[in-house]
């Protein structure tokens, strides 16, 4: 109780000191939430690309298409569990580019059975998976669904017609049969259609001059390959090498190459955002050091008295350390609370169709409050040590 | 056995090349329950002697025994524990903590004794009653007169039931009438609790009310004499 009174004794000074910590923790919380959100996005990529091999046309190919027969060839390679042709298209072609941490709205055509093999499982908030034998169905990710405000049974024209659409622009009407749960990664902005519809959109996307010359039912944009159940990422790396060796006219990318690219991008982003926030917090910590030194200077006689009535060096150190820690805790809790409130507000006001920018996680909560607490305690060590080492006789007669 | 025993106790300070002999080979035995006044001019070594007896200072040489314990053998931690359990202090400037009320100030030394708060709270209340401040128990030091503040300090010095109370000019900041009231209180506590009291004072009227006077000069004992017809039982 006395420690609380000591902190509140100089209200303005304590307020300013705690404000320093609050600003630092607020910065740490918001920047950390930004990094956590970005990392969640990357984790999805790591999970997806770490469990499959991406196969595309070899480098330098003029038309980025693969004969669909390559799917069966790849399936013949020892160790391959499954292979699926895939197609993807911009859901909003011609839309003005906007800065976003999320993946742009994308139409993905594939076999729903791929979900059984993928490490990143999609689950349904409403409705059901695509029926492979029925065309004109779509399953919407959570963000794209929110953007267009669709519910099961509604229809949506895909791709979305841009305001300045060319005369030959074509889109098709799809019925929403499923809406996905939030994943905080790529599927949130995906609209899933089946392979046949994907081939139709592929045909629409080709230049008019060659549109009728390409048998779209015989080509794929890419092939997702899965190893046998239980395959590790190094197994998949070896499998990618085998595919490149045994199947001509394709290029299989090692999953580890993609995963490492994701991880290094995430690490750099996290380092930059966290460093900026930590800098602010350390400046706040220095204000705690200053405040505690002032507190020691003001309470020299009090320290002398406490020593005279039996306080040990550790008792005195403990009291000042606890006081500094209390400043850190209060600053941490308030800063975290404000930071969390800001991120919740900004997420809530994110326009429909844009991915939210912030993600508060338990780890971030522990980091923000824990770091402020530890910082407060560390900032108190030197002043507390000085207090504890005061000579009681000198301290008692201090004017 | 003497309650407090000083044997050739010496404290020298160094100021540049000069050596200050604040206390110079003092040997004194103080029996349990004595009321001793230490008198002398400024710089005679009174306060140094008190600080040494209260284990706030370490002697340059010589020995100090409290309740038969050779304090020279004690480390800093043990000295702190001994101050908490066996010694009470009263200072001229009261040294009450402004953020604490009367009861909390009296209970301050209990913090530094194991289970002190649990066992000592009732004693703190009793002592506040004995020094006549029951109606001020929740007051802050700024709401007390000088005499009241010093009575709080006296109650604080006794809360851990020490065997020795050391007072450094406790009446130096109050008027004559209040000073006499404080001395009467000290005499009563000395009589009722059999606690040993050593008071440093310039005031010869107060010294005359102790049952023994130790007169210091230049760090040495100039005289050590019983006081006739002292008001202490």
Image (tube, coloured by chain):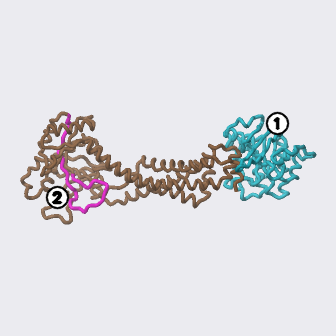
Chain colours: A brown, B cyan
The answer to whether mark 2 and mark 1 are in CB contact below 8 A is: no
Q: Which residue is mark 2?
A: A171
Give the quadrant of residue A71: top left
**Chain at numbered mark 2:** A
Q: Residue B139, position in %: x, y? A: 71, 56
Disc number at residue A148?
none
- Point out the residue furthest to the bottom here: A164
Q: Residue at x 53, y 53 (%)?
A: A330
Residue A117 placement, left or right of A394: left
Q: Secondary structure at mark 2?
A: loop
Q: Residue B45, position in %: x, y? A: 79, 48
Q: Residue at x 27, y 34 (%)?
A: A230
Q: Which residue is mark 1?
A: B2
Disc 2 to disc 1, C-alpha distance: 108 Å
Q: Is residue A87 magenta?
A: yes
The quadrant of the rendering that contains the C terminus of chain A is: bottom right
Q: Residues within 10 Å of mark 2 (few under 14, many from 20)?
A: some
Please give the range of residues in magenta: A79-107
- Point out the residue furthest to the left here: A213
**Count of numbered tags:** 2
Give the quadrant of residue A246: top left
Q: Is residue B4 visible?
A: no
Q: Residue at x 71, y 58 (%)?
A: B142
Q: Residue at x 15, y 61 (%)?
A: A169
**Chain at numbered mark 1:** B
Residue A332 placement, left or right of A356: right
Residue A304 placement, left or right of A112: right
Q: Is residue B66 magenta?
A: no
């Amino acid at each position: 109780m006395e420690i609380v009174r000591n902190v509140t004794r100089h209200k303005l000074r304590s307020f300013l000191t705690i404000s320093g910590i609050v600003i630092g923790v607020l910065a740490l919380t918001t920047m950390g939430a930004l990094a956590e959100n970005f990392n969640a996005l990357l984790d999805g990529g790591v999970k997806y690309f770490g469990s499959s091999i991406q196969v595309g046309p070899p480098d330098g190919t003029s038309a980025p298409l693969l004969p669909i027969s390559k799917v069966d060839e790849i399936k013949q390679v020892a160790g391959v569990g499954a292979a699926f042709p895939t197609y993807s298209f911009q859901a909003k072609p011609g839309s003005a580019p906007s800065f976003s941490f999320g993946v742009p709205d994308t139409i993905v055509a594939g076999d729903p059975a791929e979900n059984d093999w993928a490490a990143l499982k999609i689950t349904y908030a409403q409705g059901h998976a695509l029926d492979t034998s029925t065309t004109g169905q779509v399953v919407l990710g959570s963000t794209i669904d929110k953007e267009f405000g669709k519910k099961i049974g509604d229809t949506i024209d895909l791709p979305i017609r841009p305001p300045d659409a060319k005369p030959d622009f074509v889109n098709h009407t799809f019925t929403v049969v499923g809406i996905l749960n939030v994943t905080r990664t790529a599927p949130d902005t995906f609209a899933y259609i089946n392979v046949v519809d994907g081939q139709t959109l592929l045909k629409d996307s080709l230049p008019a001059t060659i549109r009728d010359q390409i048998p779209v039912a015989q080509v794929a944009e890419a092939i997702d390959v899965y190893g046998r159940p239980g395959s590790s990422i190094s197994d998949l790396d070896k499998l990618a090498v085998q595919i490149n060796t045994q199947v001509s006219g394709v290029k299989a990318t090692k999953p580890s190459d993609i995963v490492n690219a994701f991880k290094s991008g995430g690490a750099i982003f996290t380092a930059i955002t966290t460093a900026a926030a930590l800098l602010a917090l350390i400046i706040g910590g220095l204000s705690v050091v200053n405040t505690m030194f002032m507190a020691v200077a003001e309470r020299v006689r009090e320290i002398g008295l406490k020593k005279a009535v039996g306080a040990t060096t550790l008792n005195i150190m403990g009291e000042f350390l606890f006081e500094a820690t209390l400043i850190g805790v209060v600053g941490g809790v308030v800063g975290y609370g404000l930071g969390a409130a800001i991120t919740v507000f900004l997420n809530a006001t994110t326009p429909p169709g844009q991915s939210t920018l912030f993600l508060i996680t338990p780890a971030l909560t522990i980091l923000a409050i824990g770091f402020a607490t530890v910082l407060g305690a560390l900032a108190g060590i030197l002043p507390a040590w000085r207090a504890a080492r005061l000579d009681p006789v000198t301290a008692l007669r201090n004017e | 056995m003497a309650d407090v025993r000083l044997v050739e106790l010496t404290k020298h300070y160094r100021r540049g090349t000069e050596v200050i002999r604040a206390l110079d080979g003092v040997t004194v035995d103080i029996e349990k329950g004595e009321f001793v006044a230490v008198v002398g001019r400024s710089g005679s070594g009174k306060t140094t002697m008190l600080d040494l007896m209260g284990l706030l200072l370490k002697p340059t040489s010589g020995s100090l025994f409290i309740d038969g314990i050779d304090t020279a053998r004690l480390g800093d931690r043990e000295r702190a524990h001994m101050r908490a359990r066996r010694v009470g202090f009263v200072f001229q400037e009261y040294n009450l903590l402004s953020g604490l009320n009367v009861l909390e100030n009296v209970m301050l030394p209990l913090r530094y004794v194991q289970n002190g708060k649990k066992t000592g709270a009732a004693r703190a209340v009793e002592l506040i009653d004995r020094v006549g401040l029951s109606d001020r128990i929740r007051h802050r030091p700024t709401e007390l007169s000088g005499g009241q503040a010093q009575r709080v300090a006296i109650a604080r010095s006794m809360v851990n039931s020490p065997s020795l109370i050391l007072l450094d000019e406790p009446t130096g900041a109050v008027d004559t009438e209040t000073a006499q009231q404080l001395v009467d209180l000290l005499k009563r506590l000395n009589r009722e609790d059999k606690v040993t009291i050593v008071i440093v004072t310039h005031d010869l009227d107060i010294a005359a009310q102790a049952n023994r006077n130790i007169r210091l000069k230049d760090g040495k004992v100039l005289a050590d004499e019983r006081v006739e017809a002292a008001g202490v039982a």
